Image (cartoon, grey):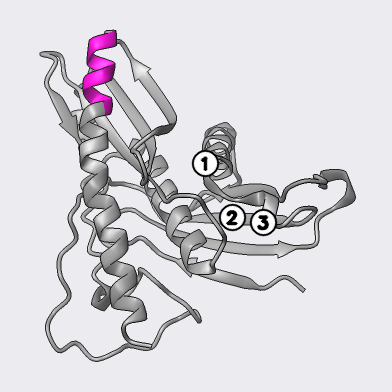
Amino acid sequence: MKQVLKESLPANGDTSVLAGVYGPAEVKVSKEIFNKATLEVTLRPKIGLPGVAEKSRERLIRNTCEAVVLGALHPRTSITVVLQVVSDAGSVSFPPRPPPPGSPPESKACASDLISDPELGFEAQHRGSPEQLLACCLNAACMALVDAGVPMRALFCGVTCALDSDGTLLLDPTAKQEKEARAVLTFALDSVERKLLMSTTKGLYSDAELQQCLAAAQAASQHVFRFYRESLQRRYSKS
């Protein structure tokens, strides 16, 4: 019987994604890989059935997870990441707001809720950019995998950049800024050497602008990874 090992809810503001990790568990023979685990990602929209956009994001998230998960430690098994969009209308801003002093522990809706409780410090602000959903899903998937104890060689995070008509670089763009932008780029980066794991772009940009956006995303990722560490420290220091 499958059991949810981890659920996390990067929430607050207008965008939140619930992430659940199932496995390592038994895998169907047709999907079995003899030398590593089969990693699957399912993205469910808030309303309706998954469409082309969800399938595209699933592929990008799966490729990112496969780049860091040590699947060879669990061959012939299945690890499934399920992402449920709770709300989709915003982007994530870091760093998080610190928890209020002396906050008493609150009951959790799930056994190991890492992020949805304000006392744990995940106060990401969402400001209205629907393209940030991919970055939000990446961050949710990473935190769920970490808290589930899935072995990984590094953490990863998603960062979105936008270039306006004047070539000005904007991190974490709002919906209005994204609509007016000449190009929007989303990167997935690892925590060890800030290496690029995945990228998706739309619009027109030069090679120099691409490198500029990548450098800005690498710098911004430090705040995300520091937030990961602080959230985990707050969580496990209570046990």
The count of marks equals 3
Question: Where residue 131 sits in the image (x, y, percent)?
Answer: 35, 36
Question: Where residue 168 sits in the image (x, y, percent)?
Answer: 11, 21
27 with respect to 11 (left or right): right
Say which residue appears at 29% left-offset and 53% top-offset: 225
Would you place residue 84 above or below residue 68 in this image?
Answer: below
Q: Which mark is residue 79?
A: 3
Are the residues at dot 2 and dot 3 in contact (C-beta closer than 8 Å)?
yes
Q: Which mark is residue 89?
A: none
- Residue identifier under label 2: 81
- Residue identifier under label 1: 61
Are the residues at dot 2 and dot 1 in contact (C-beta closer than 8 Å)?
yes
Say which residue appears at 20% left-offset and 31% top-offset: 216
Mark 3: which amino acid? Answer: Ile
Point out the residue furthest to the right here.
29
Q: Residues within 10 Å of mark 1 (few under 14, many from 20)?
A: many
Disc 3 secondary structure class? strand
Q: Which residues are magenta?
A: 207-214
Q: Residues within 10 Å of mark 2 (few under 14, many from 20)?
A: many
Looking at this view, is 202 or 77 the one in front? 77
Picture quarter with the N terminus: bottom right
Q: Earlier in the sequence, mark 1 or mark 3?
A: 1
